[in-house]
Amino acid sequence: MYYDEQKEYLELKKAQYRDLGDDEDSIETRKAILRHEISTGWSRVQHSSRERKTSNIRILLLIGIIILLGYFILYGMEQLDTVAEKLW
């Protein structure tokens, strides 16, 4: 067995809506549910934008490495020694 976050979330939602009634307490409960939904949605947006940013950085880094490797392959490996000597 493994942990299924989506399944746990759905079970929680089912329990919340099952507990709702037509009395005054249900209005407060509905407000609490709405508040929780808004905060969950906001954190999900922040998380996805953060993941997108790190993914873009990784892609740019890989593109840079590929360009450098292509440069050294096209213009010869003998220049690699002179570049390494200049760096050190």
Image (cartoon, rainbow, N blue to C red):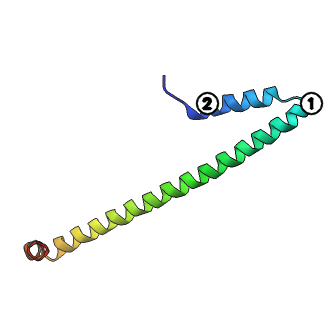
Mark 2 lies on residue: 7
Q: In the image, what residue occupies the spot 44% across and 62% down?
A: 56
Which residue type carries mark 2?
A: Lys
Give the residue at x 68% y 30%: 12
Residue 3's x, y, as percent? Answer: 51, 28
- Mark closer to the observer (1, 2): 1
- Name the residue: 60% across, 54% down: 45
Q: Earlier in the sequence, mark 1 or mark 2?
A: 2
Res 32 label: none
Q: Which residue is mark 1?
A: 23
Q: Is residue 18 above or below residue 43?
A: above
Query: What secondary structure is marked by label 1?
Result: loop
Quarter of the image with the C terminus is bottom left
Q: Is residue 48 left or right of residue 72?
A: right
Badge 2 density bin: few <14, some 14–19, many ≥20, Cα 10 Å: few
The image position of residue 1, as x and y in percent, is 48, 22
Task: Give the quarter of the image for residue 55.
Answer: bottom left
Task: Out of 36 and 68, give the one closest to the viewer.
Answer: 36
